[in-house]
Image: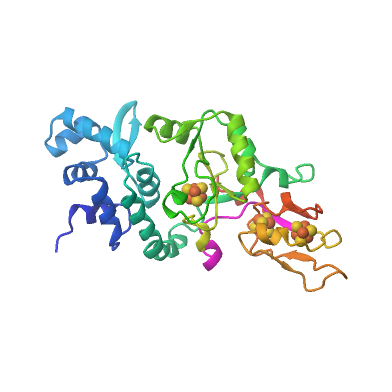
Amino acid sequence: MEKDIYEQMTDRIMLTGSKLIPELFRMVVNTAEAELLMAMPGTPEQLAEKTGRPVDAVEASCRELYHKGMAFKSFKGGILGYRMCRDMLQFHDGTILWPEAPRAYHDLWQRFMEEEWPAYARLAPLVFPKPVTRVIPVGEAIDAGNQQVLDADSADRIIENAQALAVTRCTCRLIAHKCDNPVEVCLQVDNAARYTMDRGTGREITKQEALDILRMCEEKGLVHVTMNRSHAGHFICNCCSCCCQILPLVISEGLKLVDPSRYQAEIDAERCVGCGTCVDRCHFHAIQPAAESREGAEVMQVLAEKCMGCGLCQITCPEDAISLKAVRPADFIPA
Ligand code: SF4
Ligand code: SF4
Ligand code: SF4
C-alpha cells in the first residue's frame, strides 16, 4: 500500500516505522502544508513552480511553517529559501516551541518519547559513532591553575565569546512534567540565538543573564550539555535526568548518546567525611562507598567508567574533597 504524505515525511526524518510520528505531523500541518514541506528545499518561487501554486500563497505558507517550527530558512547565495526539519531532534525542538501547540500535541510527543524513542535511540550509536553532544563541567569545579581548559570545555567561555544570546524553554521538561526544575534555561548561542529570536521562541539575554542562568542551574543540580565540537557554541542545555530525552537512557542503559567532558572527579579519601552529599548530586550513580573506609567515616570513591565529568558533586562537597582532573586529550572533542 502506498504511504500517505505523513508517513513519507516520517521516512524523510529517518523514523520509518513509527506509528506516532505521522500522527504528530498530522497535528501540526494539513495536507497542503505537508506537500509543500515535501517539495522543499527551495525558494518560494521554486516551490511555487514545483507545486503549481501562486507564489504569494507559497510565501505565506512557508512563513507559517517556519512559525510552527516545521520549516527552516536557508540563505544560499543570499537568497531566502526554506527546507523541512531534517531529523527528529529538529522536529521535536522546533514544534514543541510552536506557540500555539495544544496540550494534546505535547502529550503525544511525550508518548512517543516513552513508547518509541528508546528503540530509535539504541540505534543512534551505530549511525553516529561519536555523540553529537557532550557534557561540560561546572566551571568553578575545575582548578584551571593546574590543567588546560579549552573554550569548548567551559560554559562560561562559550557565553563570554558569544555574539548573540537567547534563552528558550526546555522542550523535554515542557512535555514531560516529571520535575519542578526551571523550564526557561536552554541557552542559545549566535546563529541558534538569532534563529529563536527571529522566530519569536527565544528571549534575548545579556551575557550576565546567561551566566546567572548557568549558576542557578548548577545550584539546582542540572547538567550542562553542549554541541560536541571544538568550535564552541550553538547551545548549552541544562538537563535533568528525569525529563531529558538523552540522560535517562545514558544512565539506565549506558547508551553512548552523549560524550563525557574531558574531566573526571576524584575524591581525596583523607578529606572525605562520608556525608553523602556527592552521592545525591550525581545523576550517573558514579559515586559509592569505597571498599576501604577510614575509621569513623564511610569514605566515598568515584567509579571512573560512570563519571561524566559534570562537576556537580565538586561544587557542593563541604570538605572540598573532590577535584576534577583532565583525563581526555584536547582532540577528544571533534574538530
Ligand atoms: S536536552 Fe536537556 S535542557 Fe535540552 S531540552 Fe532536553 S532536558 Fe531540556
Ligand atoms: S560530599 Fe565530599 S565529604 Fe561528603 S561524601 Fe562526598 S566527597 Fe565525602
Ligand atoms: S562523579 Fe557524578 S557528579 Fe561528580 S563529576 Fe562525575 S558524573 Fe558528575
> Is 317 positioned to the left or the right of 305 in the image?
right
Q: Nearer the viewer, residue 238 or 134?
A: 238
Q: Nearer the viewer, residue 253 or 297?
A: 297
What segment is highlighted magenta in the picture? 250-267
Within the image, what quadrant is residue 41 found in?
top left
The quarter of the picture showing ligand 3? bottom right
Q: Position of residue 263 (x, y in %)?
A: 68, 53
Residue 123 position (above or below residue 141): below
- What residue occupies the far top of the structure in this picture? 78
Quadrant location of the C terminus in the rendered image? top right
- What residue occupies the far left of the structure in this picture? 52
- Snapshot colouring: rainbow
Q: Position of residue 42 (x, y in %)?
A: 25, 36
> Is residue 333 on the magenta stretch?
no
> Is 111 positioned to the left or the right of 241 in the image?
left
Within the image, what quadrant is residue 233 found in?
top right
Task: Tell me what residue is drawn at x 26 percent, y 35 percent.
Answer: 64
Give the number of marks.
0
Q: Position of residue 317 (x, y in %)?
A: 76, 53
Q: Can residue 88 be seen?
A: yes
Task: Tell me what residue is drawn at x 61 percent, y 30 percent.
Answer: 208
Within the image, what quadrant is residue 62 found in?
top left
Residue 238 position (above or below residue 205): below
Q: Can residue 267 be seen?
A: no
> Is residue 261 on the magenta stretch?
yes
Q: Position of residue 256 (x, y in %)?
A: 53, 61
Quadrant location of the N terminus in the rendered image? bottom left
Task: Tell me what residue is drawn at x 80 percent, y 55 percent.
Answer: 321
